[in-house]
Image (cartoon, rainbow, N blue to C red):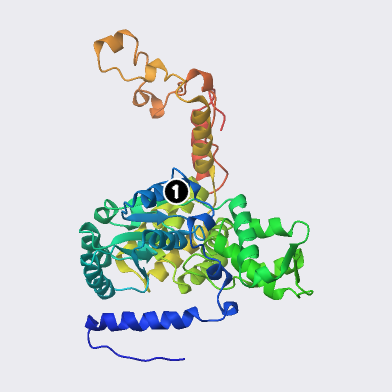
């Protein structure tokens, strides 16, 4: 069915809303087999919502908010498939609020203003309005500014959902009016409950006896990576690939392998393949394969991935996997992020490609990454128990000087080559070496320099 209509003004929003209600009713009548399993089995109440017990449990903030009937604007931040959209719909259902849902990728300021106009009418009639914005991190400044007033004056209660850190993407004025709630990646136990619930309660699966061969259930859960949507999509593909033996469906490793290979061949900018492809991108750069890096970059850009997200990941990689083997890598990665902000797509693709190729082609070292991790591990174990050596302590007062603070400190610039061998770590760990430079790139020179200086107290 194809429907075409035109509008001269957004004053026709109410007509469109009525039309969409009718169209939604038509969609509701679709046969179950045409509706994805993840949608068919979407939780309608907190009783059938699994995971995120820190939010929805007895003392959770969501439970308290609903019990006390004190609605406030929130941003749900967490990995894909952790139940952000489902939770928003449950909150609207339990609270009895009018529910509007938009996606930040496709919505406009004009659309938002039309919703606010209708929300004002509803609030005057005593109704509460919840506006759910999926991928809120993709809202530009103009859209966020338009949203701010409606949230501030109570026209709408905002529920935003994002996979990105909102402190980076949501402006401070809007963020200050929302409570950020972090959703955790679903654990194996949560996914197991979702699996059982789906098999027992889905209108289609419940008609069959679904059996897993040895180990296949665990593989299904592990392969989902904490993503409930991915779990259910894979299960549904397994179901469609299986040959029913009467009322019995058997899921074995062979079917599961085929389902995992064929089920996710499209990049989903909402998160379905978000982590798989960015992981392949990063690992290709780490593995010094510029061709693979550009290929996965193209996959992400074609799928609508946020170029800023890609640039940020390359900044992390520049330090984690290249570091001092090629210090300019971090400089170029930072310049790439700046350029992406300034010019945007589609031209930003060229800058991203240049950076990805450069990073992939550089010598690699994770010495900086390993050094800080080992240092943090030691600090976490020992706390602040190791005293800073007296000769390194600050001595701003006479008493501190009398206590030998700073005494016998050797000022490096007073010695040949601006260096003097001394002890800088606390006594119990004075010989510990966190930084271990590699033989790659510029790090070779760093290693040679340190080795030439530290002849007795350290080994490089």
> Circle 1: is it few (<14), some (14-19), or many (20+) Cα within 10 Å?
some
In the image, residue 107 lies at what x, y percent?
33, 73
Please name the residue shown 43% across and 65% down the image.
Answer: 352
Closest to the observer: 325 or 378? 378
Please name the residue shown 52% across and 38% down the image.
Answer: 373
Q: Is residue 130 above or below residue 177?
A: below
Please name the residue shown 42% across and 52% down the image.
Answer: 330
Q: Which quadrant holds the C terminus?
A: top right
In the image, residue 42 lies at what x, y percent?
52, 65
Say whether residue 301 is visible: yes
Q: Quadrant of residue 366?
A: top right
Please give left or right for residue 40 compared with residue 15 in the image: right
Please give left or right for residue 220 compared with residue 299 in the image: right
Q: Secondary structure at mark 1?
A: helix
Instruction: Give the number of marks.
Output: 1
Closest to the observer: 366 or 457? 366
In the image, residue 43 lies at what x, y percent?
51, 62
Q: Quadrant of residue 305?
A: bottom left
Q: Which residue is mark 1?
A: 55
Say whether residue 261 is visible: no
Q: Quadrant of residue 8?
A: bottom left
In the image, residue 408 lies at what x, y percent?
37, 14
């Amino acid at each position: 069915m194809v429907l075409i209509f035109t509008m001269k003004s957004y004053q026709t929003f109410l007509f469109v809303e009525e039309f969409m209600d009718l169209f939604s009713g038509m969609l509701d009548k679709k046969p179950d087999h045409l509706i994805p399993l993840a949608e068919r089995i979407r939780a309608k109440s907190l009783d059938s919502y699994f995971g995120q017990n820190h939010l929805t449990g007895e003392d959770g903030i969501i439970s308290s908010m609903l019990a006390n009937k004190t609605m406030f604007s929130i941003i749900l931040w967490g990995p894909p498939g952790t139940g952000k959209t489902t939770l928003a719909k449950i909150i609207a259902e339990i609270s009895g609020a009018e529910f509007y849902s938009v996606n930040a990728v496709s919505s406009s300021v004009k659309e938002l203003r039309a919703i606010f106009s209708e929300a004002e009418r509803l609030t005057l009639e005593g109704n509460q309005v919840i506006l759910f914005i999926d991928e809120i991190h993709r809202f530009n400044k103009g859209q966020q500014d338009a949203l701010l007033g409606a949230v501030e004056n109570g026209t709408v209660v905002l529920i935003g959902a994002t996979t990105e850190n909102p402190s980076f993407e949501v402006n401070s004025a809007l963020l200050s009016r929302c409570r950020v709630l972090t959703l955790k990646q679903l654990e194996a136990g949560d996914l197991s409950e979702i699996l059982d619930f789906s098999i027992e309660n889905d209108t289609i699966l419940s008609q069959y006896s679904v059996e897993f061969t040895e180990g296949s259930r665990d593989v299904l859960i592990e392969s989902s990576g904490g993503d409930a949507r991915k779990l259910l999509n894979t299960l549904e593909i397994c179901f469609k690939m299986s040959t029913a033996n009467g009322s019995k469906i058997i899921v074995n490793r062979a079917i599961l392998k085929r389902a995992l290979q064929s089920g996710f061949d499209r990049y989903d900018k909402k998160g379905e393949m978000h982590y798989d492809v960015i992981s392949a991108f990063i690992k290709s750069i780490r593995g010094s394969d510029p061709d693979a890096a550009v290929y996965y970059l193209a996959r992400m850009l074609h799928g609508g991935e946020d170029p800023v997200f890609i640039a940020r990941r390359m900044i992390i990689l520049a330090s984690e996997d290249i570091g001092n083997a090629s210090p300019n890598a971090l400089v170029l990665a930072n310049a790439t992020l700046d350029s992406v902000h300034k010019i945007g797509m589609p031209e930003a693709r060229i800058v991203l490609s240049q950076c990805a190729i450069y990073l992939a082609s550089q010598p690699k070292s994770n010495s900086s990454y390993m050094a800080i991790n080992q240092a943090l591990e030691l600090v976490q174990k020992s706390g602040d128990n190791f005293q800073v050596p007296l000769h390194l302590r600050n001595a701003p007062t006479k008493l501190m000087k009398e206590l030998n603070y700073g005494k016998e400190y050797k000022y490096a610039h007073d010695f040949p080559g601006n260096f003097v061998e001394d002890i800088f770590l606390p006594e119990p760990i004075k010989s510990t070496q966190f930084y271990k430079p590699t033989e790659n790139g510029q790090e070779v020179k760093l290693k040679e320099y340190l080795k030439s200086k530290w002849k007795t107290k350290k080994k490089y």
